[in-house]
Amino acid sequence: MKKVRIESYFSLPTDLAAEFRGWSEFVAGDGYNVELRDLGGRSVIIRYSETEDAPELTLESSDEGALFARVLGHAVYALSAHSDTVCIHRYPEEAIQ
């Protein structure tokens, strides 16, 4: 499993679901929340949440595969269009349950 946390200002909304809707792997989504799955069953889920520090996105993948890298890259690219700061934090493998 792979997991990253994305922090940004989120002051100008980015419709990530709209960004991914044209992908063949797109399953469902609305706003910042997106679910994608490839033909091999590998999935990537992006979820928006409010924390006590700041809003954040969590991007999780069920396993290894190119889909995770593609989704992460496209999400960062899309978010950077509306923010001057986008921070990515990788979860250590042992911390992912």
Image (cartoon, rainbow, N blue to C red):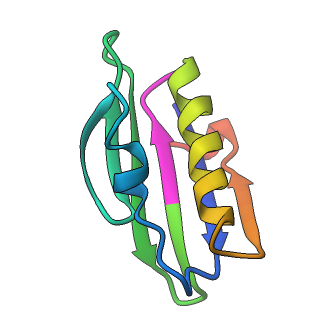
The relative height of residue 7 versus residue 65 in the rendered view (above or below) is below
Q: Is residue 75 above or below residue 40?
A: below
- Left-right relation of 97 to 91: left
21, 41: nearer the viewer: 21
Q: Vertical placement of 31 versus 23: above or below?
A: below
Q: Residue at x 40, y 64 (%)?
A: 15
Taking 51 as reference, is 47 left or right?
A: left
Q: Residue at x 65, y 66 (%)?
A: 81
What's the magenta bit mostly, secondary-structure-wise? strand
Q: Position of residue 20 (x, y in %)?
A: 40, 43
Q: Nearer the viewer, residue 62 or 18?
A: 18
- Camera-side residue: 17 or 41? 17
Q: Does any portion of residue 28 appear in the rendered image? A: yes
Q: Count the labels in the image.
A: 0
Determine the residue located farthest toward the top in the rendered image. Answer: 40
Q: Residue at x 26, y 53 (%)?
A: 29
- For the magenta stretch, what is the residue range? 58-63
The image shows residue 26 at horizontal and vertical percentages of 30, 35
Q: Can residue 64 be seen? A: no
